[in-house]
Each structure stands twice: as C-alpha cells, then as structure tokens.
Amino acid sequence: MTDKIRNASTTTRRQALKMMALTGVAGIFAPNLLGKPAFADTPPSKPTGRIVIGFSQEPTVFNPLMPRIEVDDGVHFSLFDALFRIDPEGRFQPALAAEVPTTENGGISKDGLEWRIKLRDDVKWHDGTPFTAEDVKFTLELVVDPNFRSWRTAGHSLVRNITVVSPTELTWQMETAFAPYLSILADTFIVPKHVLEPEQDRNTAPFNNAPIGTGPFKWANRVAGDHLELVANPDYYGEGPYVERLVYKYIPDLTVLYTQFKSGDIDIIGSQYITPDNFDEAKKLPGKVVNLVPSATVECIYLNLGRPQFQDPAVRQAIYAALDKQTIIDALYYGLPTPTESYMPQQSFYYNPDLPKHEYNLERARELLDGAGWKPGSDGIRAKDGVRLSFTNSTTSGNHLREQTQQFIQQSLAEIGIEMSISNLPPAVMWGEYWTKSQFDTVIVGIIFMTGADPDVTSRFHSGAITIKGGRGANNGQYANEEVDTLLEEGGRTFDPEARRAIYNKVQEKIRADLPLLPIFQTVTVRGHKAGIEGIVPNINTRIDTWHAAAYRWKK
Amino acid sequence: MFGYLLNRLWQSIVLLVIVSIIGFAVLNLIPGGPLSQFALTPGMTQEAMDRIAEQMGLNRPLPVQYLDWAWRLVQGDWGTSYRDGQPVLNVIGRHVFATLLLMGTSTAISIAIGTWIGIRGATHRYSLFDYTVTVGAMIALSIPTFWFGLVGIYIFSLKLGWLPAGNMYTIGDGSALNYLRHLIMPSVVLSLVNVAIWSRYMRTATLDVINQDFVKTARAKGLTERRVLMKHVVGNALIPMITLAGMQLPGLLGGALVTETVFTWPGMGRLFLDSLGYNDYPVVMGLLMFSAILVLIGNLIADLVVAAVDPRTRLD
Amino acid sequence: MTALAATSAPSAWWQSRGVRRFMRHRLAIVGLVMIAALTLACVLGPYLLPYDALYIDLRARFSPPLTGSHYLGTDPLGRDLAARLLIAGRISLLVGFFAMLLSTLIGTVIGVVAGYWGGWIGAALMRFVDAFLSFPSIFLLLALAALLEPNPLMITLIIALTSWMEVARIVEAEVRSLRERDFVLAGRMLGLRSMHIMFREILPNAVGPIIVAATLTVARAILLEAYISFLGYGIQPPLPSWGNMLNGAQQYLASAPWLAIIPGIAITMAVTSFNFIGDGLRDALDVRSDHF
C-alpha cells in the first residue's frame, strides 16, 4: 500500500516537470547534458582506472544498425552517438546535432514535413576523420538500403530528398508527418561513411567486428564468449569519459553474475541485474550500492484474440479478475514490481493514472463467466457453443520466475473452471513464428511498448499491424478496434505533447477496457555497483543501464 | 596398410555426410530461427525479420541451403556465425583454449589418480581398498556431474567462500594462480567420472598383464615385486590406455558441456548451448562436424594402436 | 560397452561362481533392494503423504526440510518436496524404463539384421550405427528436444533414439559370430525361414549381453533425462521430474540448498542401483567386457 502512495506522488511530480520540459523549452539546454547529479569532487582531468560491467547475455552485434538485443545496445551507447539522446526525464538532448529540431526553432515545419538538422562541428570519428552531415545522410540511406540487414525501416522509409547543405547542416522531407520519428532518430546511431561506403557488402564488413564510432569509448578487443574491452576516447566532444577502460563481461548465469558482484569481480551488475530474491541480502552488502530502478518493461499476459475462447470480453475480464496480482508480486517477486493497469510505464508523461483498478475476485470471475453462458462441463471445465475454456500458456523455458507465475495462475484459473496448460519453449523457438505469426494461445511476456520516450504503439495495437492478416507490425495478439486505430493514426500525426497526451490516455482507456492483454506489473530492476563509482544514472527511456557510461568514474 | 587407410578414409567421408545431413535436417526443422531473438526488440516487426531472412538466404529450400553449406565446407569455408558475423572456425577456435585447459587438467588428474588406483586395485585384489574403490567408482559414475558441481559450488563458494563459483579468471588478473583457483572445482568435478573410468580400465589391463608369462618369468628371475610391477606390468598395461585416451578425444565437446554450463566456463560446450539457443546454425553445424571428425580420428587412432600393439589384429 | 563383448559357450551360468562374483552379487542385491524400495515409494508414497505434488501454497514457500509435515521441505511455490520427489520418480523411472525397452528393441532388430545378412545391408546398417555414434549424444538430445514437444513420451523417444547403437553393435557382433555355427547351418539346411533362425535360434544366445546392456541403459537414460531437463530442454513444469526439479535449484542454491541436494540424491541412488545390478548381471551371465 505504501508503495502505491509513494509511486503516485512521484509520478505527479515528474509529470509536472515533464510538462514544463515538453511545452516549449525543448531546444534550450543547460550544459549538464546528461542530467547527472552534481559530483562531490571535480572530475579527473585524465581518464583513469577500469570499470567491469557484468551482463548475463553476450553482446555480439556491433554494427548498431543491424538487428540487436539490449546488451548490444548497451555497448553501442558507449561507442556511438545518435543525433539526439533521451534523458531520464524523457527530454531530448542534442548529441551529434547542435540542437533538437522543434517547430518553435524552425527545425521541423508546422506541417511536420520539412526537417532541418544542424550538427556540431567539433566531432571526430575514432580514426580521426571529422564527422560531417555526409555521415548522417549515409546512415539514413543505409538503413533503408534493401541489400542491408537493417533492423528497422519504420520512420526512415518516410524520409525523402536528404540534402547536405553544409558539413554541419542537412535537410530532408517526410512523406507524411510522423511525430515518433524524433524518438526513432534518438535510437539510430550514426555510422561513418568513409569506412562503410567503400565496402562491397556492409553486412559482413570488418567494421561490424571492429566498429569505429564517435562515442566516448573506442573499440579495444573482444574475447568471444567472455568479455569485451573498450578504451577511453580522449577526443570525445561531450562530457567524459572518466575511466580509461570499460569492460563488458559476459556471465551467462544470474546466480554466478550475482556471486561475482558480491565477491567484487565485477564493479557494476548490468542487465539482467540482481534477481528479486537476492534483493534483501544485496542491499546489506558492505561496499556496494544497491537500489531499485523501475524499467519500462510491462509484464503481461498476451492473449491471442484470434482464438475463439478469447473473443468474448467476459472471458478476458474473468481471467483478469482471477489474476491474483498482489500475491504474484509480493510472494514471487518479493514485493518489488509495481502493479499496473496500463501497458505504459507510470513514469511516462503520457501515462494515464485514472484507469479502473484491478480487483482480484474469484467470485466475480465466476459470475462473469456464468453470466456470459460459459457453463462447467462434466470435466469441470467451462464451455459454450462447443468451445472449451482451455488454452495453453507459454513463456521462455528457463525463466524461473515466469514459470512460477504461470503455475500459480494455472491453479487460480482451475478454481473457476478454466484449464490452462503450460507449454514452454526455448527462446529461439518461442519468439519465432510461434510469437510473430500468432500461433500461441497465451504467453507471459515482458514488453517495452514505448519507442524511447515516445508513446506510439501503432505496431502493437493497430489492426493494420497484424502479421498473419498481411499487416505490417507486431500486433501478435490480433487486437482490432476501429476507435483505437483512428486514435493511433491521429497520435502519429500530432506533434503537440499536450494533444498527444489526451490521445494516448484514451488509447490506454480503450486497451484497459478491451483487455487484449492482461497487465500484471511494471518491472522494477535491482541494480548494484561498487560504492566507489559515481555518475551512474538510470534512464527509463533506454532499455539498458549503460546508456551514459561516459559519465562513470571512480571517486578519488 | 595403405589400402586400409584409404578404405577408412572413404568410410569416414560417408559417415560425415550422413552426420551432416541428419544434423542439418534436425536443426532446420526446429521452428523459430536465428532472428527470433530480436523479436522482442521494441519496434521489431515480422516484416523486418522476413526481409532480413531473405537477405541471409534463410528462406531458400532446405536441400539448397544444405548443398550450399556443404559445398562451401568442402572448399574450406565453414560459414559465418549468424550471431556475431565471425567465421565459424574463428568462433570455435576462440573457445577451444578454455575447453582444452579444462579437459587437459581433468585428464591429467584422472590419469594420475586413476592409474594409481587401478594398479593398486589389481595388485591388492579383493582387499578392502579394491572393494571400496570398485563401489566408489560405480557410485561416481552414477552421480549427475552437474549436481556434483552444484553441491561443490554450495560448499566451497557459497558457504566457505574458498573458490569462485564460475568463470575462467577474474578480469584484470591474468596470473596463473587466478586461473588455478577458477580451475579447481570444474576440473575436479569433471575428473570424478574420468577417474572412475580410468581406474576400472587400468585395473582390468593390469590384471591381464600380471598373469602373463613374461611377468611370471620376471618374477622367477628373482626381481623384486616392485621392480616387476614398474618395469613390466605398468608399461604393458598402459598401452591399451593410449587407446582409451584416443577414445576420449570426442568427449571434448559433450563431456565438458554440462560442467561448463554449471561453472559458466567459456568453452566449446557453452558455445554449443548458446549457439543452439540462438539457432546459430553455422556454428552448431561447425561444432557438430568438428566433434564428428574428432570421433573418427579417435576411433582410427584407437584401431591403429591396437593393431600396432597386438600382432593378432591385422588391418585389412 | 564395446563390441568386444562375447558370451562363452552356452554353459549354465550358475555353475561358476567365485568369491568375487559373490561380492559382486551382493552389490547387485543392494542395487535390487534399493531400486525396489524407490519404486515402491514412488508408487505408494504419494498416497500416504498429506500433500499433492502440484498443490501451490505460497505461504509455505521455501520451508526447509522437517517443517511440520513437509518432511523434505517445500519448493519456491510452496509445493511439498517429498510429494514432488516421488511423483518425479515415477516419471523419471518410467522414462528410463521405456527408453531402455525401446532402444533395446531398435538395437536388437538392427543388430540381428545387420549381423545375419552381412554384406552390403549389414555394412550400410553398421555405418548408420557409426554415424549415430559419432554424434555427440547431447547434440542429438538437445536438438530433438527443441524440435519436439518435450513431454515425457517425447523425451522417452528422444533418449531411446540416442541410446540404441550400443545394443546394435553388441548384437551384431554376437550374431555375426554365431551365424556360421553348426546349429544355424543345420537350421538353414532344414529350410527354416530367416526370421525364425534370426530371432528364435540365434538371438537367445545373445540374451546375456543384451540384458546387461539394457540394465545399464536404464541407468544412462535416467541420467540423460536429468541432463536435458536440467538444461531446460526436458520435461516441463508443473510436471516434476528429477531433472527439472534441479533446473530451478541453482538459483536458490544459497537460500534453499535442499532444493538442489534432495533430487540429486534420488537420481544418484536410482542410477547407482541400476549400475550395481548391471554389473552383477554381467558376472552372473558371464559377459566379458572391458567396460564395467
């Protein structure tokens, strides 16, 4: 209960801050680019020392434009820069760009179709070549090159007529106004034209395994299956770096990751962090700083609405009512995550705090089902018109907490006459066509629905985003609601944050009412680092903690 | 002899073809694919994955993909890892050291202890020692190695804090002592089964030799029992052990896999599991061929050694 | 087991027991008693315990052994570990037993056919056996487990599919050596069908080595189930198996070590029993082998 109150108050305060930030001042910034807290002492003049960050997955993709997982992102942030970055408060900050384009400063035309970007003139690639507008043009063209394995073309495919005006300025037109593009650009790292353009095949270029960027750290070496080492870039244009060497260590097991953090072998425990069951012990560890950091991931049960069982809203409501969220959170996750009604993180400016509250009530669940005509059969399982209330639930095998959640839900549902069987799959099978082509009944999954800080969810909830119906997107639950479609289209065209907030609040209302997915909680991660390290700031708008390793440093 | 080798070579190639076809078929029938790990990346769509699959040639018919892969292999190109874009041989090469270190240490321990136990067991047959060791070896063979590893971690890492729970070394500390500390538990765990096997084989081999005429002659000449043992028995009994060592070569991948998993050891077993988990077919196929070739070489060595030592065997 | 196994002339096996065999037999008896006790416990035990193996009680999670009537404690969902262990035992033992039956059947048929006909059929079949033997078995197991739905039946099939080769080799060698014996030649001259000669005349002579190999296969199958379930590719929860009970245990090693220790002891006991029995049988049936 106290948790809820605490969260509610911080949310409103943050929202107020963000409203101020988003309405009008988006182009003018204080020199403190990273939004960091003030340091206790002055930063070292020369990068010193080494920091070892442990990851439980191995970063293997170093071309930031190719398909990647979150730990790859973690490394890209150290090596590369995008035009902008998103700070912890959800504001855009210029990175390679000299300023963030807005309608006010003339960077984006009133109709959202004309874009003009001004770049910094003091940036050098790691090999000493100056960074120019040609690199940006090259990058934006490469991501839509049909021969290149670009992981995302959404947004970029709308860009037309990229023109280099000067080495520090370029313009382009958009085919249609697309507000989320700013967020997509903040997630698009710029790659060097002079290195990649001469390559025959950019998919297999040596660059992909010895990347050259503009970021605070340079590539040093990699021992596959073990670790990756970066060294400070003394010519970095921004603040930092303060440490001489940054090591990303791959430790495939969460228990070992934690014991290595405990023993001091690693300095920072990175993704997937400390497991909830170890939080109590971890926060008492001497010489370690351990804290709770909300992440944008929302843990939910995805329903495949293509299945006859789930087409009746009463069934979805009944399952939701039978979901004992609080027990799952308190017992299985040690009370750390925050229960939620929305797919959107509660720290977001666009979060709707007024959604109806979930109530665990088995009696109500039974009434809903009885009322809708789902009667228990001879085997105790409810059925209606020949459709049994029986389905499978899947998640990645080996994710113990989810497996426990599953089994717990299975027992609750059995009590109201719903049969849920468990069919877990290895990750490469689970997230293949089984997921993307809607072959599942239900899955438990943690998803980040945001694009950076942007609230656009067209690819998740628009009826035109259902892959098996020929759509383009990731609406794998096959949710279709015309009103939501219209709202999403409107939201994509709208640039004014206040107007967008109204739109996306409504989207959240609709989703909460229709329940195409059953939200369980918003994830809270347990992060930790050695007491001597300063400059670590979490950022809910990036999916990895090492988004600003440039600022990490050892206290003198 | 030459004809024999040629014949063996031909048979081996047939074997490799069968193994590769079965392996390739099973792997590619697994639903999902190398791109599914990216499905949860915010903004990722099936459309993008289809496009990339097309670029990577993943949607060609399976036989075409197989022939393409096999033809490249014949030319010495083992393919490129889907996961990190490196040539497969490089990827495997970088994991060989860790596995060799672990297997080498473990084999040394097993041979040293196993030989001693085996000989002592043979010379003190039906003694309390022999009996205990026989039963002990059989129990050792019955313990799941990963479980033995877990118990080890619980006692020596979590409770006593004497040894690290995993990894090969601490970043920034490349000293031999550091490696050694990390090496102790996994190699001891891995040795458990091997000591059992070695000691049993050694016992049998020693028994075989002990009863042979030349040993009896040596005894009759009045040599001390110890001399007879060292000079005549052990030397002869060790010959079949070479065969065994040859047979152990293929265990490089399979044997260490579970131990490497429990101790997060960055070797080939882990590489195999990671690659299988991400459906990185080229690497998995590479490892499969690599270990199949090792099996064949191991068998060949074993047969050749047997032939060289035992005049009754003729190779034809 | 290697192909070197061979039976002596069909003399009665009970005629030659020495002290050593007696010692060995004592082990075999220990194994037999242990496995009988385990089986009995797995069959009857769940009815005697106050808890259901699948019943979740989050208030009782992580109870250490001997908490109230949770004799072996509880798991992370508060399920009774003793009940789970016994139900898991049913599954693991059944998987082991049926995998043995199936692999012995496959191996025997292939071995008999290859050994009896020889020639190119025999050569082809034995190359096939060699091909399977050159797979690291863990590769086949994991790949097949990822391919097929990992329920107990499938896991049984998968294990059988990776365990039949040794029996095939033993039987092939056996049959090949018996093929030219008098009683077989006599059978041929009498005009008996090949099937009859193979399975009624020759095979009974190879029963000794087959039984020994089969017993050891049970042990191996139980271990393999544990390995693949431990790696997460095996039998899926909520159904318990000895292997998958260990799967989640590593995470709780520090706070709830009994979760890891107890199922491991059960596996070791069962596998040891079968190895003891197999070893005793080898002596009793006078099967010579380098392996033990």
Image (tube, grey):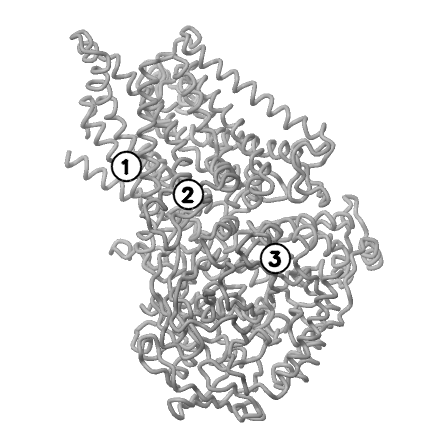
Q: Provide the residue designation for mark 2.
A: B257
At x 36%, y 82%, the residue is A131
Q: Which residue is mark 1?
A: B298
Q: In the figure, is residue A346 to the left or right of C19?
A: right
Residue A159 spot, x, y in % from top left: 48, 85
Instruction: Give the residue at x 44% y 8%.
Output: C14
Q: How many marks?
A: 3
Q: Quadrant of the N terminus of chain A?
A: bottom right
Q: Residues within 10 Å of mark 3 (few under 14, many from 20)?
A: many
Which residue is depicted at the point 41% across and 67% down?
A243
Tag 2: amino acid: Leu
- Do the residues bearing badges 1 and 3 touch, measured as CB atoms within 8 Å? no
Give the quarter of the image for residue A111. bottom right
The answer to whether A93 is drawn above or below residue C106 in the figure is below
Density class for disc 1 (Cα within 10 Å; few <14, some 14-19, many ≥20) is many
Between disc 1 and disc 3, the foreground one is: 1
Residue position for label 3 = A440
Pointer 1 chain: B
**Image coords of residue B87 (percent x, y):** 32, 59
Above or below: residue A25 compared with residue A190: below
